[in-house]
Amino acid sequence: MQTLMYQEKLIQEIQKKIAPTKSIIEAIANALDISYDAAHRRISMKSKFSIEETVQLASYFGLSLDKMFQNSDHVLVKKTTEIQSIYDLSNYLESSFKSLTEFKADLDTTLYYSAKDIPLFYTINTGLLSQFKKYVWLNLLSADGLDVSFESFLAKTAMDSRGQKLHDFYAATKVKEIWNDTTINSTLQQIMYFSEAGLLRADNGKMLCDQVKELLFALEKECLPGNERYQLYYHELLILNNNVLVSDKFKKSLFVPHTMLGYFITSDADTCQQVSNFYQHQLKNSRLLNTAGTRDKKVFFNKAYQKIDLFKARINALNEI
């Protein structure tokens, strides 16, 4: 009796996940790759779902069995694959894009980005800064490290345009980023580290600093009162974490980092709504640089430019020594 109650609950949850016009029998048949009649027997309770079928249905429709049957706080998540090679990185960029394709790349989609570091979407195209970030990621994520200079990495690594699709998706949607004074620090420190290690030539180190500054110049130009597509918020106190929330009128997805590039991904409605509420609260406690006075906006960007110039000067001094 209890088994049938659980089966009925599972069917009810699946019904919520499919379009109102779609047949629940057809949905079950497609998910389990069984006949229409076999699916009908399960829907009518004449046959029971096996354990394997229950797990398969939960995975197919993105349901948390813990949460459904135990009223627990568990949330079903997917996770990105580990990265230990340039091949893994290419696959990561491709799968990350696929995770976003359920959302349209237009202004009906909004991305909220808690920018502990310079947002990933800016550093995954084919420019020098993007190549450098890939070099850093592989040094830190590969079990053996790269143990080669950035210039050798450039010579041996072909340009990969797969990250460009993520970059273009981001550029086509509404974006609300939260930054603080430390958002650019890790990138600058990475440039400095490999310069001091003799694995990055001074000319490339200074060029990378210039590209970080050019990126900020471009964002400063975007910070206009009438720009609804891009909004940059400055929060002095919030500890940022690189969380990304993607939403439209019908659904939300949350990307939570668990390693440098690894993300847990969930579309759990309650969790995503809680995070959305949190973002709305933090935005109210942040300064929207688009509508801030000239002084406040200039103070934020000038501090960042001065920091970049300081690191560039350190690289220059290191080269002279």
Image: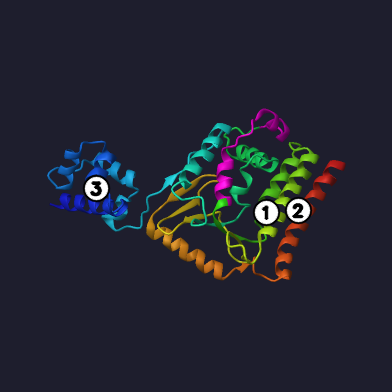
Element assignment for label 3 = loop
Q: Earlier in the sequence, mark 3 or mark 1?
A: 3
Q: Which residue is mark 1?
A: 184
Question: What number is the disc on residue 216?
Answer: none
Which residues, given as a range, are shown in magenta?
147-171
Residue 161 sits inside the magenta stretch: yes
Depth check, front residue: 71 or 197 = 71
Figure check: 207 above or below 175 = above
Figure check: 290 above or below 195 = below
Q: Is 237 on the left or on the right of 151, as rendered?
A: left
Element assignment for label 2 = helix
Q: Is 294 on the left or on the right of 284, as rendered?
A: right
Q: 10 Å neighbourhood of mark 3: few (<14), some, or many (≥20)?
A: few
Element assignment for label 1 = loop
Q: 10 Å neighbourhood of mark 1: few (<14), some, or many (≥20)?
A: many
Please state which of the two labelled residues, at mark 3 or mark 1, is closer to the viewer.
Answer: 3
Q: Which residue is mark 3?
A: 23
